[in-house]
Image: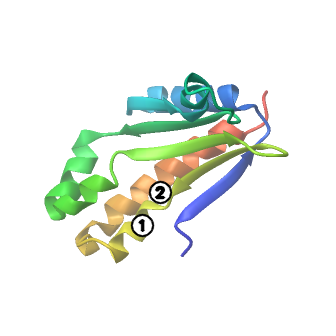
Amino acid sequence: MDALIVETSPHDVPATVERIRAGLDRRGVALFGVVDHAGGARDAGLELADEVVLIFGNPAVGTGLMQADPRVGIELPLRILVWAGADATRVAFRDPRALVAGYDLAEAQDTLARLRVLLDQLVAEAVAPAT
């Protein structure tokens, strides 16, 4: 299973990010932070196309995973990357189900599958055509 899932968005980076934020808000999922890589590059006097990472999660879910294997804390909270590609905006996330291979999470496969559903839904909403 390829752990990195990449989709194409018909929207620019700011609009795609806003759609993800709105989806998190509708679901009551905490947005812990936003990393603006392009903004950081500009602050350093460098150029980088728009690139943003959204960091989010639900402690009620993530805590159970970390109780099963504390090392998985390096993978949490969840993240979605949105960037301006050469020809389109791209959206990517790591498939949480792949965490079973590196951590003691065999008993948490249902939780990891639910996290994948959440990520799929957020991205599908973000890349849907404007109505």
Q: Quadrant of the C terminus?
A: top right
- Which residue sits furthest right? 87
Q: Residue type at mark 1?
A: Arg
**Is disc 2 in contact with disc 1, using a CB cutoff of under 8 Å?**
yes
Is 46 located above or below residue 97 in the figure?
A: above
Q: In this view, does 126 lie to the left or right of 78?
A: right
Q: In this view, does 51 lie to the left or right of 49?
A: left
Q: Is residue 80 left or right of residue 102?
A: right
Q: In which quarter of the image is the N terminus?
A: bottom right
Name the residue at 67% across, 33% down.
Answer: 50
Q: Which of 67 and 84 is in front in this view?
A: 84
Residue 97's label in the rendered image is 1
Task: List x then y, in percent, for residue 41.
Answer: 59, 31
Q: What residue did someone put label 2 on?
A: 116
Is 76 located above or below residue 101 in the figure?
A: above
Q: Which of 112 and 2 is in front in this view?
A: 2
